[in-house]
Image (cartoon, rainbow, N blue to C red):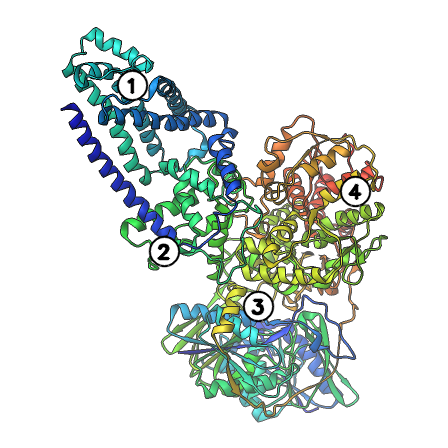
């Protein structure tokens, strides 16, 4: 009677929950099928390895200790929940079934850990209340925690009644009665209350069983409608993550348009991203635009897209062109243009959601409607006409090379060992030109055979692509590749990390595969090979990792080693390496209106450095950083306390090209 | 209602202008759409958003104007017309105006928009010339153009910040000072796509004759009244300024 | 030379400076060849304004539709005058009216035209004009054929010194069939400061690069006791209200000190400020036309100079 009832209920619940689950998943998969293709099932070995690293080992999750630990408890509880489900269903469907004395107590141990996890989660959400949860569906989070709590209570209850049910109703042995130590402990209460007879035990067991299995199945039915689909989606989403090269916004040349207007313009991985988001807000917490007071949160971009898609699925309009566009409709243009494409969101995301390509694609849609910041528009026109963001004639590009006593070879006319791709800012910004000349003198000093492309060099196109102007990016890339192909060189180095990223990662899709280094890497090599001898520059300094060097290209060691060779006492800021904080210039932001910014990211960064003890030098390795951070220290009036120094200046002092006094490297 | 936007390309002033033998080597220079014509096009496209009008971009084939016309199509112009014939880069405005005037009359264009000026219109601005040749109502240095029935309204700007709202009966010619919004951006991909899918209408035209002027020489103006220069050192310049202001008693004590 | 016909513009009850300039040069050219100077003026108010102008004849067009500039009415009247008098030279200022009427009059009467004239002189037998083209970067010397219409950039040469007493002729105003002036407006000042009254103007242009840098200009203006004004691109970008704009379509200013910061000096801008008593221009391009009218200049980045100068001025005050 008890068995029959529970079996019937179980089958009914499985069918109902399975149907609800399948219907939902089918709808989502239906959308994924119409989305753009992307290759994410190659390199299986690496993918499995990354799943192990990021699912089993929770590598990114542990970056926030409390959240990492509590999630690990609950996450592992789900694995152990499987044992319980097998055991519980087995007990009812196959009289005498048992998981044995080894697995059984694991269930109880994990019940305790899950309970701790739930308490920590409540502590986190109710007491600590991190800002990253702002905008997340907190009710859903509590509901889910409640359901998980119900399940573990159910487990303990049915385990506590099972010895009596086994003996009195099913007439089977229960060899694991003691092994379920929590249940056994509770069963002592029933003994004391006298609830051990067939009737009371049956009722108690059925209650526990339904609380456990019922909620598990209710959970299954509810999951795909909540953020907790990540329980199922996270593993495949991590499996299909972008394995790189990380810095390439687009893996392949674009045929038609990179614009994202509808859900069909997203890739199937993008759709998967939407349903994998756990609303944890780690992306929001590291977003420079969000920190600056801009209306952008990478989390909200994902959630707004997901909610819109859900509504459209419910209305049956997921494929309709009548719905408002994603760019400028579902996601506001203010959100989209606020992004610096720094990639901190993607770096922080525990489930490998890719925010930047979606934002760039939606920007492309805005751009195709002619919607772009007027200043940025001028820059696009200047890139198109003159090949640089400054709107200077192309022949002015090498003007910095005119007034120095160092011969600079024309790599178009003679072979060189190193080809130097200078970049717009380094070549044309009056404040950076001096540093560019310094690099030339350093190379000359080291006896390096180097040259530049003179006026044949154009902007690399990294920012044009991130603004969403693919055609312009392509034109610039092809122009540079043509010039590079005509030149004879062994290796390339760039001053600007943005150029580096384009040459190294984005030009691959056009078949350009030369080795590209950053100048910090090049100089480290020169020192290590003994070509450049350096004396010590004993200053205490911090180093700012440029997004397009550290995060997108993983070049975090070379600049640090270089500083070490120079005897610099490096003091790290809390956010460094791949977790560096953007200066606010990337993705074309440097040319856009700053209305709405309440606290510039660069100022926040300078304050971060100023909190370090006794550090007065802020070392940068990107021409845009020179410009951004100098503006910040001037605006903040802290030029004396925090001096922005380019790596080239440190090098110049170290090799004796400039004196420490001259370069103002002496702390007062 | 039919709107024509008369466009031309001009040397890009970003590039240094080199004069050879008293003339400009136009063939070696890079050309860009005249910025005021771009404003006129934008204004026409904005008018299209609020009234039932057909916008045609018109240019004279004096070299490479195709890209400019395709760009106009990509931005939203309905048609693009190239007036073809034996025309060189040095075609004077007086002859350009005749070609445009013939076209506008033949096509019964209702409202003609063009840039109020261009950097190279030494023998008269297109708007006034076309108006004079066609006898149409006209106004230059205008903005905020709207169609109201068979009239157009616009705001004409005068010096000193004065302005007047006026109403002209069509057909009319307007020299646009600035569009209501900055000219829109059009992506390179969109222009390329239009180049594949659309064609420029070619209309044979003959300039005929007009009273022209003879240019004796073109040169860079001598720096006769040139400023006394203080160089390029920020601190030295700041110092010089302070001293000058002290001398002139312009500093607050 | 026969008759020189000058289209006069009035301002506040007197002939504009630009018109006085035309009269001065028109008289010189006419005198050299025994020609006459005729003024064409519009409206009742013009009668007083041109009473002592150095012209032989002044035609005052009067009637409906001349109190306020109406291109159609003015053009019809001028066309009739040109038709009737067959002048050897027609001079207009390169103002809105000149840009409006010069070209259409020339085209209508099939007369040659020279625009953007900055110099007009007789060389042997030919009349020559210098035309300012390519945004002031180049000049062209042009032969001015007989009967030509020439539009002159205001301020190109000094105004007429002498006075006369022209014979005043009346002309009824033609009717306007196609063009109506609906209303006349002043630029919105929005309660903003009046830049025409300031003694010191810190004027910024494209070189400002970013609206946030306005703060630097504000600080400098404050240190100087001046007011921030700007060139057209700054207004078009929406960084400052139109009431702050100096130039042809903005305000004409004559401060004691005009700081042109990051302003290249398009002819339209120069028109509005070249009469300032002292002009200091700072622009990174040494070939910028602004240096042609400035008294002192420097080729530094204004974003560096503004804070440096502010600091120096404040240091001096403290």
Compare residues C80 and A99 and report the one nearer the observer: A99
Q: In the figure, A512 relative to B134: above or below?
A: above
Residue at mark 4: A526
Residue at mark 1: A156
Residue A611, position as x, y percentages in the image: 62, 28
Q: Kindly indicate whether the residue at mark 4 contacts the one at mark 1 (C-beta within 8 angstroms).
A: no
* Drawn side of residue A517 relative to residue A35, left or right: right
Q: How far apart are marks 3 and 4 (CA)?
A: 63 Å
Q: Do the residues at discs 1 and 4 belong to one chain?
A: yes
Q: How far apart are marks 1 and 2 (CA)?
A: 50 Å
Of all residues shown, which one is farthest toward the top? A192
Q: Which label number is shown at residue B159? A: 3
Q: How far apart are marks 1 and 4 (CA)?
A: 66 Å
Of marks 1 and 3, the one in the foreground: 1
Sequence order check, earlier mark of 1 and 4: 1
Which quarter of the rendered picture does the N terminus of chain A lie within? top left
Chain at tag 4: A
Q: Which residue is pictured at 42% across the width and 54% down the height?
A: A328
């Amino acid at each position: 009677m008890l068995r029959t009832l529970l079996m019937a209920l179980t089958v009914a619940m499985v069918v109902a929950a399975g149907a609800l689950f399948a219907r939902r998943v089918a709808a989502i998969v239906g959308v994924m099928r119409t989305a753009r293709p992307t290759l994410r099932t190659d390199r299986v070995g690496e993918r499995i390895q990354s799943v192990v690293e990021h699912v089993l080992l929770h590598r990114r999750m542990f970056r926030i200790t409390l959240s990492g630990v509590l999630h690990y408890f609950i996450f592992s509880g789900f694995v152990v929940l499987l044992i319980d489900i097998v055991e519980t269903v087995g007990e009812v469907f196959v009289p005498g079934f048992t998981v044995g004395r080894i697995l059984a107590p694991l269930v109880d141990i994990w019940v305790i850990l899950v309970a701790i996890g739930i308490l920590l989660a409540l502590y986190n959400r109710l007491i600590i209340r991190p800002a990253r949860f702002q905008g997340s569906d907190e009710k859903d989070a509590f509901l889910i925690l409640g359901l998980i709590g119900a399940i573990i209570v159910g487990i303990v209850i049915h385990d506590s009644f099972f010895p009596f049910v086994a003996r009195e109703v099913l007439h089977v042995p229960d060899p694991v009665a003691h092994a379920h130590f929590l249940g056994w402990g509770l069963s002592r209460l029933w003994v004391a209350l006298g609830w051990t007879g067939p009737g009371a035990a049956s009722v108690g067991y059925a209650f526990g069983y339904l609380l456990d299995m019922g909620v598990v199945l209710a959970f299954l039915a509810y999951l795909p409608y909540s953020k907790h689909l990540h329980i199922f989606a996270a593993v495949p989403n991590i499996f299909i993550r972008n394995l790189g090269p990380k810095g390439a916004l687009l893996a392949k040349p674009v045929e038609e348009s990179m614009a994202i207007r509808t859900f069909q313009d997203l890739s199937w991985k993008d759709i998967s991203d939407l349903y994998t988001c756990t609303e944890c807000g780690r992306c929001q917490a590291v977003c420079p635009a969000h920190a600056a007071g801009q209306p952008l949160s990478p989390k909200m971009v994902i959630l707004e897209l997901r909610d819109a898609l859900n509504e459209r699925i419910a209305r049956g309009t997921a494929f309709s062109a009548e719905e408002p566009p994603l760019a400028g409709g579902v996601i506001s243009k203010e959100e989209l243009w606020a992004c610096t494409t720094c990639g901190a969101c993607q770096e922080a995301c525990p489930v490998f959601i890719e925010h930047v390509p979606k934002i760039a694609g939606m920007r492309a849609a805005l751009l195709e409607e002619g919607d772009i910041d007027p200043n940025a528009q001028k820059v696009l026109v200047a890139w198109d006409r003159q090949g640089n963001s400054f709107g200077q004639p192309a022949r002015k590009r090498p003007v910095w090379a005119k007034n120095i006593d160092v011969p600079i070879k024309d790599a178009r006319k003679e072979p060189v060992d190193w080809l130097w791709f200078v970049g717009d800012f380094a070549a044309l910004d009056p404040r950076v030109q001096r540093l560019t000349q310094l690099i030339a003198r350093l190379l000359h000093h080291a006896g390096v055979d180097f040259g530049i492309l003179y006026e044949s060099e154009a902007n690399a196109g990294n920012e044009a692509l991130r603004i969403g102007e693919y055609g312009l990016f392509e034109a610039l890339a092809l122009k540079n590749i043509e010039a590079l192909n005509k030149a004879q060189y062994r290796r390339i180095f760039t001053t600007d990390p943005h150029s580096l990223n384009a040459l190294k990662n984005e030009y691959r899709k056009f078949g350009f595969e030369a080795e590209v280094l950053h100048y910090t890497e090049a100089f480290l090599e020169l020192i290590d090979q003994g070509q450049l001898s350096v004396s010590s520059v004993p200053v205490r300094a911090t180093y700012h990792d440029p997004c397009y060097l550290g995060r997108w290209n993983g070049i975090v060691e070379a600049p640090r080693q270089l500083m070490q060779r120079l005897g610099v006492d490096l003091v790290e800021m809390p956010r460094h390496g791949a977790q560096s904080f953007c200066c606010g210039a990337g993705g074309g932001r440097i040319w856009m209106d700053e209305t709405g910014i309440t606290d510039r990211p660069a100022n926040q960064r300078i304050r971060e450095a100023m909190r370090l003890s006794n550090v007065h030098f802020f070392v940068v390795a990107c021409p845009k950083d020179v410009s951004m951070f100098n503006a910040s220290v001037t605006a903040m009036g802290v030029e004396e306390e925090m001096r922005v120094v380019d790596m080239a200046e440190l090098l110049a002092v170290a090799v004796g090209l400039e004196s420490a006094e001259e370069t103002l490297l002496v702390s007062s | 209602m039919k709107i024509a936007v008369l466009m031309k390309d001009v040397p890009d002033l970003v590039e240094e202008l080199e004069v050879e033998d008293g003339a400009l080597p136009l063939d070696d220079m890079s050309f860009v759409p005249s910025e005021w014509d771009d404003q006129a096009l934008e204004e026409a496209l904005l008018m299209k958003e609020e009234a039932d009008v057909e916008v045609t971009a018109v240019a004279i084939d004096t070299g490479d104007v195709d890209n400019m016309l395709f760009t106009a199509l990509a931005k939203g112009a309905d048609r693009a017309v190239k007036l073809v014939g034996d025309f060189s880069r040095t075609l004077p405005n007086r002859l350009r105006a005749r070609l445009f005037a013939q076209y506008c009359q033949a096509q019964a264009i209702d409202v003609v928009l063009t840039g109020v000026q261009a950097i190279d219109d030494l023998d008269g601005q297109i708007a006034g010339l076309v108006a004079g040749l066609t006898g149409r109502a006209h106004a230059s240095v205008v903005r905020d153009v709207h169609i109201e029935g068979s009239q157009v309204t616009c705001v004409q700007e005068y010096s000193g910040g004065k302005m007047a709202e006026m109403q002209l009966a069509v057909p009319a010619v307007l020299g646009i000072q600035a569009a209501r919004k900055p000219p829109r951006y059009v992506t390179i991909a969109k222009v390329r796509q239009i180049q594949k899918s659309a064609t420029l209408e070619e209309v044979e035209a003959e300039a005929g004759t007009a009273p022209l002027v003879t240019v004796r020489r073109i040169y860079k103006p001598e720096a006769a009244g040139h400023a006394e220069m203080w160089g390029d050192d920020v601190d030295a310049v700041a110092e010089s300024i302070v001293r000058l202001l002290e001398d002139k008693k312009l500093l607050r004590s | 030379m026969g008759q020189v016909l000058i289209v006069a513009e009035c301002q506040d009850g007197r002939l504009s400076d630009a018109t006085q300039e035309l009269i001065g040069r028109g008289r010189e050219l006419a005198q050299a060849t025994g020609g006459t100077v005729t003024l064409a003026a519009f409206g009742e108010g013009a009668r007083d304004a041109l009473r002592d102008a150095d012209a032989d004849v002044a035609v005052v067009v009067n009637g409906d539709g001349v109190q306020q500039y109406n291109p159609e009415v003015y053009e019809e009247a001028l066309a009739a005058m040109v038709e009737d008098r067959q002048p050897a030279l027609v001079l207009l200022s390169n103002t809105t009216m000149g840009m409006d009427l010069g070209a259409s009059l020339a085209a209508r009467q099939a007369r040659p035209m020279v625009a953007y004239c900055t110099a007009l002189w007789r060389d042997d037998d030919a009349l020559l004009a210098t035309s300012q083209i390519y945004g002031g970067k180049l000049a062209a010397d042009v032969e001015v054929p007989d009967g030509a219409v020439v539009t002159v950039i205001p301020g190109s040469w000094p105004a007429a010194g002498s006075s006369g007493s022209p014979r005043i002729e009346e002309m009824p105003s033609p009717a306007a069939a196609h063009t109506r002036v609906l209303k006349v407006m002043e630029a919105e000042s929005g309660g903003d400061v009046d830049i025409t009254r300031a003694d010191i103007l810190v004027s910024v242009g494209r070189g400002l690069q970013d609206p946030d840098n306005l703060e630097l200009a504000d600080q400098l203006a404050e240190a100087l006791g001046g007011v921030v004004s700007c060139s057209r691109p700054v207004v078009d970008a929406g960084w400052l209200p139109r009431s702050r704009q100096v130039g042809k379509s903005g305000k004409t200013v004559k401060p004691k000190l005009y700081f042109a910061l990051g302003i290249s000096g398009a002819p339209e801008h120069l028109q509005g400020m070249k009469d300032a008593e002292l002009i200091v221009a700072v622009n990174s391009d040494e070939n910028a036309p602004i240096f042609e009218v400035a008294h002192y200049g420097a080729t530094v980045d204004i974003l560096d100079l503004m804070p440096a100068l502010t600091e120096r001025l404040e240091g001096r005050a403290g």
